[in-house]
Amino acid sequence: MTLLAYPDRVISRPHADFRGAAACLSLLLLLGACAATPQRTEPPGPFDVPAAWSAGPTDETSVVGADPSLSQWWRRFGDPLLEQLVAEALQANTSVSTAQAALRQSRALRDQAAAALSPTLGSSASAQRGWSGGDSTGNSLRAGLDAAWDLDLFGANRSALEAGEYTASASAASLGDVQVGVAAEVALGYITLRAAQARLAIADDNLAIQLETLQITQWRELAGLVTTLESEQARASAEQTRAQRPGLQTAIAQAGHAIAVLTGQPPAALNARLAAAMPVPQPAGMPALAIPAETLRQRADVRAAEHRVSAAWARVDQAQAQRLPNFRLSGTLGLSAATLGALGNGSAVIGSLLAGVTLPLFDGGAASAQVDGQQAALEQARAAYSAAVLGALKEVEDALAALRGDRERLLRLQAAADAASNASELARQRFGSGLTDFQTVLDTQRTRLSTQDGVASASADLSADHVRLFRALGGGWRDDDNRAAATAPASSTPTP
C-alpha cells in the first residue's frame, strides 16, 4: 500500500501551499502509531563458568586478573630469532591477510548499513527536443535535485546497523584470534626445530661413544679377548644410532619449511637463518593465571562468538521490523524551461513532494520465513558461542595438566639421564679392564641414549605446553584491541 502527495507539482510562487502535504504526513504518522512495535530482544547473559581451575595454583603460578605482559608472550622465551619470526609472520602470513580483508569488508558493510539511516541527495539534468508529424514540438531543458529519506520508525535499518557493528567487532576479534594462533604456530614450529636439532646432537654424541666402543671391541677381538659376536653387537648398536640421523634431519627441514610458509616465504627461505643449532627456548617463569571468567574475556575467539550472537539477535529484530509499515519521504526541486535563458526565470522553478508508506499484505509467507531463518541462525550462533566457551575452558585445563605432567617427567628423566651417563662410563671402563661383559656396555649405552633423547623431547614438550597455555589464556589479546580495530580506518590493523 502506498500513499502519494503532490506528484510533480509546479511551484510558481515562493509561499506555496503545503497544507496537503502536512495532512498526508499526519496520516502516515497515524498509521505508524497504529502498528505494533516488535518486542526488542537482548543478547544472552554470561555463560556459567567454574570459579577456579581444577588444577589450582602452583608454587609458580598465582590467580590474578588479566596479565598485560601476555600481549607479546613470545618475548618471555628470550630468543631474538623467535621474536623476529613471529613479527614477520604477523605481517606477512596469508591467514592474517585474509582476516584483515574480512575485517575491511565487515567495516564497509557496516558503513553501508549506517548510510541507510541518512537522507539521500542526488542531481539530474536532461535536454529533450521533440517532433510530431515532421513539425518540432519544442525543446525541454531540466536540471534539479532529488532527495529521499526512509523514516525507519520501526528500526529495521537501525537493527541492520547494529548487526553490522557487531559483525565488525566479531571480525576484529577473529583477526586477533588468527594473529595469536599464527604466533603460537610459529613458536611451536620453532620449538620442534630446536628440539630436533638437540636430539640430533645427542645422537651424534652417543654415536661417537659407540664408535669408540666398536674400535675397542675390534682391538680386543684381534687380541682374542672377545669373539666376533661382541664386535658385531657393537657395530649393530652404532648403526642403529646412525639410522636415527636421517629422520631427525628430515624433521629439522620440515619444521623450517613450515616456519617459512607461516612467515609468508618459500619453504627453503629460512634454511640459512635456522641452520645453526640453538637450545630449545624456555620461558622465564610461569604466567599468572586469570580466573576462568577473566580468561574467557581475554580470548578473542570467545568474544568473536559472543559478538556473532548479538549480531544474530539484531538480524532477528530487523526481520521482524521488515514485516511492519515502512515510511518514506522524497522530493525534487529543479528548473524546467524550453531554452537556457528561460531557466533563470522564477516560473521555471518546479518541485514535488512525496510521502509514502508501504505495508506488506500478502507475500506467500516470505517475511515469516525470513524471521524463522534468522531465529535459526541465532540458535546456531548461540550453540557456537557455547562451544567456544567450553573449548576455551578445556584448552586451559589441558595445558595446565600437561605442564604439571611434563614438568615432573622432565625432572625424572634428567635424574635418569645423569645416572645413565655415569653407568655408561663406568661400564666402558670396566669392559676395557676386562671386569664386565660387553652386554652390560651395550645396555648402558642404549639407556644413556634413550634417557638423553627423552630429556630433549620432554624439554621441548614443556616449552610447547607453555605456548599452548599462553594461547589458551588469550594470547594477550584484549577487547580494547577489538573496539579499536572495529572503528579504525581500513588501513590500520590490530596487534595481538
Image: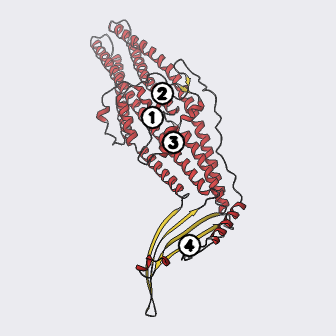
Q: Nearer the viewer, residue 148 or 204?
A: 148
Q: Earlier in the sequence, mark 2 or mark 3?
A: 2
**What SS does tag 1 mark?**
helix
- Decide: few, some or many residues near mark 1? Use Cα within 10 Å; few <14, some 14-19, many ≥20: many
For residue 126, what is the image quadrant? bottom left
Q: Earlier in the sequence, mark 1 or mark 4?
A: 1
Mark 2 touching mark 4, by CB under 8 A?
Answer: no
Mark closer to the chain start, 3 or 4:
4
Q: How many numbered circles are shown?
A: 4
Q: Position of residue 370 (x, y in %)?
A: 64, 58
Label 3 is placed on what type of residue? Arg
Closest to the camera, between mark 2 and mark 4, is 4
Q: Which of marks 1 and 2 is nearer the N terminus?
A: 1
Amino acid at circle 1: Ala
Q: Is mark 4 on a helix, strand or loop?
A: strand
Q: Distance between the residues labelled 2 and 3?
A: 28 Å
Q: Which mark is residue 184?
A: 1
Residue that carries the numbered disc 3 in the rendered image: 483
Residue at the spot of label 4: 352
Residue located beneath label 2 in the image: 466
The answer to whether residue 413 is above or below residue 82 is: above
Label 3 element class: helix
The colour scheme applied to this rendered structure is secondary structure
Is 154 or 319 nearer to us in this picture?
154
